[in-house]
Amino acid sequence: MMMPEEARAEALRMFRKYVPWLLIVGALLLAAFRSARFGGYFPDDAYITIRFAEHLSQGLGIVWNVDGPPVEGSTSFLQTLLYAAAFKLGLSLAVSSYAMNTLGLASLVVILYLTIRNLTGRFDVAAALPLAMFFSGVAFSVHLNSGMETLIFLTLISASFLTSLVLLDRRTWTAALGLAVVNFFCLLCRPDAAPFIMGQGLVLAIVALRAWLTQANTLFIRQLAVSFAVLVAMGLTFLAWKYSYFGYVLPNSFYVKASDPLAFNGIQPVARFLGDMLWRIGLLVPLLIFVDWRFRGDHGNQVPARVALLVVPVAVFLAYYTTTLHLVGFFNRFEYPMAVFFWIGLSWLLSSGRSTERLQEFAGRALGSAGGRVLVAGVALCALAVQFELDSSRHQKWFSRIQILHYEPIADALARSEAGSDGTLVFDSAGYIPYVSGFSLIDPIGLTDNVLSGREPITPTEREQYIWGSDPDVYLGPVPAASAGAESGRDDPLVQSEYVQKILLQPVIFAEYDRIIGKMTYDERLEMLHIRMRELRDRWIAVGEIPYPYPSPEEYTHFLYVRRDSPHADRLVDELGRVTTRPIENIDFDNLLDGQRRHNLQSLRLLAQEH
């Protein structure tokens, strides 16, 4: 029979052993619950990668349109290859996506556990709690279910950090070559891993140079040089292949996202990301108060180098993103992978600083040892509960809403026309509709089109001539047809309407067009717009309005047009006419919301019954 002191020691041992994993498992169960409730629908950008992957799996190459030229328009080359391999094996889209993310999540859990053990030598409540907050956050579950590369990139970039720590500790050739391979896959997954890798290389180079100058270790600088030489060699080989295949090196997405670096157009989303991280970390203030800031752990004078490896690459990465134009920023999509390093740092600080033990000891003076443990558990549960409550209103079915209420009826109508890849759609959003309908697509922004991408200078007039000279069959977008007889924006009464002035001629609304119209004057924007308006008036049939589910501003909407001399015109007008909610000629563009009717689930069910 155990003595009281032995029982207390055993209770403490069990507490330290199992509670950390209970926190992690609980957080993962919450992520699984959110996946079951909100998953199954992907944002439009995911379908860009999926469409490229499908064509690759069919032996067409990395092309956007059937019989089109090679195009690199997806965010992640690696994920395109992974999806293509899954499709080649006969896996469905849903199975492919969730298999990738499940394997990625399992790998991430192991990587983060090994990282914390490397940094602190243990895995206790103080180390597990920040990771549990990371896994249970709303952004994590959204990205887990987005069908995009975010979780894969997050896993790879975490593996890069862990490998750099191992290299710093052990100074082995295996770790040096392993770092080169992991970083190469990071770049394959997202080319914007380059700033992170540069920051990492800078820190390791300083450590290696100091060791070489002090004769403490001359091997490390050779290992580091070989590691980055191997990385550069692999990278150059890949870029050479890309140039031979695509005819260019940087993917189209970089041209679309890029803006004048000195404009720092990315400061606002980066600041929003940092602000979100700040209040989440603030939930752990009760533990931060009890950190013993004198800790150095088992790593002695290596602590500054390890801190630099954690901080500098993240800082360089985020600094890079202050210079870019963000197009799709749901839950800070581009910055989000860096969030894991904030939680790693917090785990390291709380665990090595003995925060939970010190809080437990402090509370134990008044509450006893058992009461101290209960208080620590209470602080952990309260932090998780408050984060959950604050996140609960932010996790909505917005992926499914836009798909069900907007993309699906249009895609299904196009599919019923049986035009397939012979039909061409002009639409700024490039993913779901062409993937489901099989239509070819011209993306005016240039993400999936080499001519419109901005690689070669192209004037606004040339842009419009290229789009409409391709004889597309369907236009979906916010632009109405010009007034009868108007030959310029200056003599068109429709241009003076509230809708055109507030929606179409305000560049801030169409952020994705900033690269095209950001530096244009009002007159230049008007001229470009009216070219499109005259085109729609002179050669197109106005089918009707189909309101956008998430209008911002409120008056933003979409119209459907079919080219008069399209070989599929009759069938397209018939099918698309079923999904529009009112004729365009009935719209008062000074009061567009008057009489507007939006699709809802009931109206779409009735529409489906007709077919």
Image (cartoon, rainbow, N blue to C red):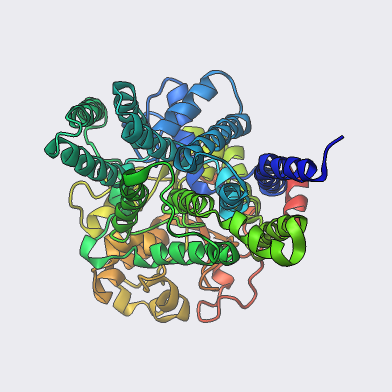
Residue sitting at x 41%, y 63%: 269
Residue 406: image x %, image y %? 60, 54
**Nearer to the camera, 432 or 287:** 287
| Residue 213 position (above or below residue 272) | above
Residue 338 as seen in the image, left or right of residue 207: right
Q: Which residue lies furthest to the left in this view?
A: 213
**Nearer to the camera, 209 or 290:** 290
| Residue 491 position (above or below residue 104) | below
Quarter assignment of residue 61: top left
Residue 564: image x %, image y %? 45, 50
**Nearer to the camera, 328 or 153:** 153
Residue 530 seen in the current view:
yes
Residue 64 seen in the current view:
no
Residue 11 as seen in the image, left or right of residue 324: right
Residue sitting at x 46%, y 81%: 498
Quarter assignment of residue 29: top right
Residue 565: image x %, image y %? 43, 46
Residue 371: image x %, image y %? 76, 59
| Residue 296 position (above or below residue 48) | below
Quarter assignment of residue 323: bottom left
